[in-house]
Image (cartoon, coloured by chain):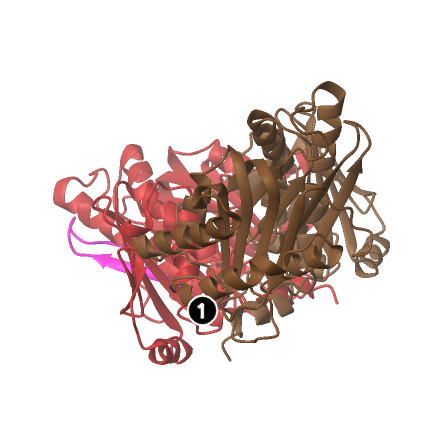
Chain colours: A red, B brown
Amino acid sequence: MSDVTLPLGYSANGISCGVKNDPSKLDLALFVSDRPAVAAGVFTQNKVCGAPVKVSRSRVPRETARAVVINSGNSNACTGDRGIADAEAMTAAVGKLLGTTGEDVLVCSTGVIGRFLPMEKLQSGIAAIVPTLGASVGHFNAAARAMMTTDTFAKEVSQQVDAAGGCRVYGCAKGAAMIAPNMATMLSVILTDACLTREQADRILRHAVSQSFNCVSVEGHTSTSDTVLLLANGAASPGKPVSGEAEAAVARAIDEVASQLAQLIIRDAEGADHFITIDVRGTRTRDEARTIAKAIAEGPLVKTAITGADPNWGRIISAAGYCGVELKEEDMSLRVNGTPLYERGAPVAFDAAAVSASIKNNRDVSIELTLTLGSESIRFWTSDLTCEYVRLNADYTT
Amino acid sequence: MSDVTLPLGYSANGISCGVKNDPSKLDLALFVSDRPAVAAGVFTQNKVCGAPVKVSRSRVPRETARAVVINSGNSNACTGDRGIADAEAMTAAVGKLLGTTGEDVLVCSTGVIGRFLPMEKLQSGIAAIVPTLGASVGHFNAAARAMMTTDTFAKEVSQQVDAAGGCRVYGCAKGAAMIAPNMATMLSVILTDACLTREQADRILRHAVSQSFNCVSVEGHTSTSDTVLLLANGAASPGKPVSGEAEAAVARAIDEVASQLAQLIIRDAEGADHFITIDVRGTRTRDEARTIAKAIAEGPLVKTAITGADPNWGRIISAAGYCGVELKEEDMSLRVNGTPLYERGAPVAFDAAAVSASIKNNRDVSIELTLTLGSESIRFWTSDLTCEYVRLNADYTT
């Protein structure tokens, strides 16, 4: 990604330290701030969560974060007390080399669950990666690649903010698509040189996640290790937290980075033929809109209809009907790729062959469901369900 | 089904009346009681529901039911006021021929949604089917076949009850598996000659459904027309409602009929390679057990793992973790086909090749998740997710 704009005061790298069997695959990423940074985090809601989630969750929000260390290839989930000790040891090793405490280091792991981390390899890897850190686009790209498991491309997005005297936001992510024996995880690290308070960072990140990573779903399976971290080191305006219009501009940039990363995750979903944007409008609350959009997104019958290029309004309307939101069929109108299929409780005549062709001939599909219950809305993204998805998720062992 | 035991006082038949294009496919079923019967019903929770659901729901529980009329091939859902009028007209036509009011007739439809019923064909069909009603096993089998849409075999189950002076329970059902353009529906009619009060019938049917049809899921899509009806005409002991032990025996028989029918629906699920029984034990409530079992049953990653014969404990444990029930990984132990894979929060060593072979070589798979939270439990049934499922649900238009 040649047009990446990097925030000031950060360095990064990604290397291979032997967690993955294939030595050509990077498996250890490190992001470092040259000064204490405000850090916020949002984590998986799964009751079964990895040790790194437990450790990192206990350390945010904080004002003195220095680094994020991530390994791929082994998730350190379902590993009990030893898993916690291993996650803490990773952060302690990084902290020691940076001249700070392990408490100031956040940690993520992704990969196979139920196996202990190969700590010797990770300790050696951490010792090896710190001296190689750099602030080039290539260094950050290596870090982004080192987070990957089944992703087919690294996901990096950046934004230049003119307000606040000029600052930058960079984010990278790995995908939510799942393939065993990996319980693949959605991870994202967002870095800014804006100066934010702990309260600002936490609030801005939660908002960004609510309209990005919480608006995507491949198959509804919340992983044990999903993590989004935000670091704000203030290098652009040390000691002067943004406020007013400048704060809003930074928040918009972080929203945009998170949203683009979330969409890249869906674009890279395993075995998918279509990228589906679902707009639900006219609900009483945003949560209602999300519940409806999620039911449509995760409905195997909706997904397979899109795979088959079938403008099947019945499956979409029915998914809205069973999601638990209080509604009547008369409240709903539906468009697919811009064509009205259903209005206020009744199907309308449409050119099925034309709509089918528009699905078949385009990777992007638009589903717009408009209700008459209120003025809230959401935009949600998902992928379709193909034979290739089943093959990837069923036949990986053979 | 040669060993079907039919309850006294009922007749039935199934014919082709032209709703389906193929004249060799039956599409109109009628079940009639020769005397007023107590009737109870349980219906879809989908907010978008068919006109027949609205009409039948308003008529149960009642003490004077005489018939159930069902057409397949066209579901009469999303059809507005005209759909209601059509459903009522079907019941009025049957009622008139039976010398009673349409109010005493219940109605179901299954098939394509969003199209008006071809009422001329149905009126002619109703006039034609009434004179052909009969009380033979063949007549009931024809009725069971006339309910079918994508089912590959008729589903009929019966039970002889020795208590209560001897009585009988017969049930038939059509499948929940979904294939468009049909929004295929789960329908079941259960008939007994036991004498039940309205309150007994309603209570016994709700119990039976809660541990049968509400314990199966193919893909979590609740159809717009799901309906289970129970008629009890008392022909075995007119005017003498069962009580005590006899009532319990009748309830057990109805439970058993419903449970076997629900399992037959899963055994006939489209494109499935495996029949999966999920036992969740040791929860605080039965609803908790159901929530966990449903999350496992509907998880595409669990389903595809079974398709791929992979004893992937991580996907099962993780599904339990994200379903919303308050639990810790330490609370859970898991067996697949009897082999322990995970105990109290940690994976255990097992012969993966042997467990994989046991999945690959058997259609039936057992998943047993035991928790330490309480003493409630549930048994749930589902199918796996195959390429054939995707093909059937995606490529039906080509």
Span shown in magenta: A155-168
| Res B327 seen here | no
Q: Residue furthest top?
A: B244
> Looking at the picture, does residue B258 appear above or below residue A184?
above
- SS assignment at label 1: helix
- Residue A70 x %, y %: 53, 50
Work out which quarter of the rendered image holds the N terminus of chain B and state it. Answer: bottom right
Residue at numbered disc 1 = A306
**Left or right: residue A39 compared with residue B13:** left
The kind of secondary structure the magenta stretch mainly shows is strand
Q: What residue appears at the point 19 percent right and 43 percent down from the top-left corner?
A: A247
- Residue B128 x %, y %: 54, 64
Q: What residue appears at the point 13 percent right and 45 percent down from the top-left corner?
A: A245
Amino acid tagged 1 = Ile
**Left or right: residue A375 compared with residue A173:** left
Nearer to us in this view, A288 or A67: A288
Location of residue A286 (image quadrant): top left
